[in-house]
Image: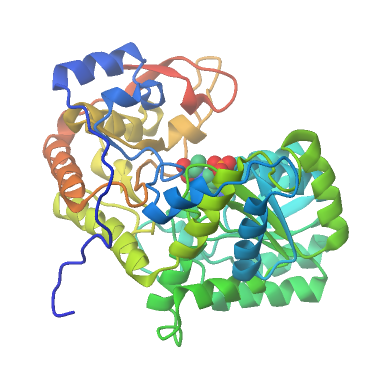
Amino acid sequence: MPYRTIIEPFRIKSVEPLRFNTREQRQAALEAVGYNLFGLHADDVLIDLLTDSGTGAMSSEQWAAIMRGDESYAGARSFDRFEAVVAELTGLEHVIPTHQGRAAERILFGEIVQQGDIVPNNTHFDTTRANVEFQGAEARDLICPEGRDLQVEAPFKGNMDVEALEQTLAADADRVPLVMVTITNNSGGGQPVSLDNLRQVRELCDRYGRPLFLDACRFAENAWFVKEREDGEADRTPRDIAKEAFRLADGCTISLKKDGLANIGGVLAVNDPELAARCRDNLILTEGFPTYGGLAGRDLDALAVGLQEVTDPDYLRYRVRTAAYLAERAWAAGVPTVRPPGGHAVYLDAAALLPHIPPHQFPAQALACELYVEGGVRGVEIGTLMFGHPGGDGQPETTAPNELVRLALPRRTYTQSHIDYVGEVIEAVAARARQLTGYVIVEQPRWLRHFTARLAPVG
Ligand code: F0G
């Protein structure tokens, strides 16, 4: 097409009104919830970029599929349709539905991870790490060196450090029950993993006789980046690339709330029949019968359609371009981000924008709060509020390596004018960055404090 503008590859059939409020109302709402954006009521948020998980819009075909949902407790037709699509995509033999990604993680790790084990991953997502650690094992992040540098431009900053993986396997293979690779690498900025890297990891897993699992929440976005960036892959379809990635693995866990294009769902798929049998027993205990696994039949049908739609090149081109466009708006406003932009989110670098706010005063939380007060835009802090720990005895906080605000993009939900608006809000906040002040925590729980802690502005 001779035009530069990449349009949303859909038109809108059902709309949900946004609620506008005033700066004063937002200020009051934020104060009332102790400056924690998780505490806000959705009605008080104008553009919600808290997460891309379960927040997307379904297509007309998915809504039609919902009406075909078979709610039989056992042997539902919906399961057959779901299983067929997952099997075609992944090539994996045993398909076990779960209500969301972390349930698949819990069941898998509960069966194969033991106290004292090591689970290597490029970077564990929070719930994945927590589920590994819950088994008494070590969740070891082995991201490639360029993935640790926020600013360096490299095509596959989500890659596993294969040398470090080899060292772990050479030293401790008997303590490694599985190797995991997260595509795309959410905690590392939504950065992709190359097919070449996956092949090298596969080769190491073969050499040491260890199974390889993908945490494949954003497999379609990863496939698009491979098509765009990896030598020799440009002419393949994203689906073909995704299929190859899955076929390099022995199993996968997927939160289908992302590239399943539905609002709920997850799956655990494995080749090993004996492991599958044990996982199904565990599933029955906590999720449900193996033909629904904590989901309604209609959810399975929506997912069966979503998992086919998500590899559409027109959709993926628009999807990845949206994140890049928002990042460009941030750069134009003088706000650095993790580079290059990931597929599902833009990560603003609050440490770079707010050098006058020290990490123990939560600069990324200050930026997230200000984006909300300024324009009703909700993102999420990924910094010392999330990953730091209270010092105790008058000691300062332990701080996180980076101070980021993630603006995650729900799928097919906001239009370009919404993104332009977010860009303007970023500009307005950046223009008075020097005036922003830090925060102190006034109340915090023992674990996962970022969800419920209450804060107050410094001074
Ligand atoms: N793995 C990755 C890479 C994820 O990003 C998530 C969720 C999960 C596993 C867990 O899946 O939520 O369905 O249980 N990420 C969401 C986010 C919550 O906002 O990034 P779940």
Q: Is residue 300 above or below residue 296?
A: below
**Percent of width and height locating residue 446:** 59, 20
Q: Picture quarter containing residue 216?
A: bottom right
**Percent of width and height locating residue 417:** 15, 49
- Is residue 143 shown left or right of residue 210? left
**Percent of width and height locating residue 314:** 32, 69
Residue 86, can we see it?
A: yes
- Asked whether 196 or 235 is in front, the reply is 235
**Residue at point 46% right, 19% down?**
453
- Asked whether 169 or 370 is in front, the reply is 370
- Is residue 331 shown left or right of residue 381? left
Q: Quadrant of the N terminus?
A: bottom left
**Residue at point 55% right, 57% down?**
304
**Residue at point 15% right, 22% down?**
23
Q: Is residue 156 above or below residue 391?
A: below
- Asked whether 238 or 347 is in front, the reply is 238
- Is residue 179 shown left or right of residue 305? right
**Percent of width and height locating residue 187:** 49, 49
Q: Quadrant of the C terminus?
A: top left
- Asked whether 412 or 419 is in front, the reply is 412
**Residue at point 19% right, 45% down?**
418
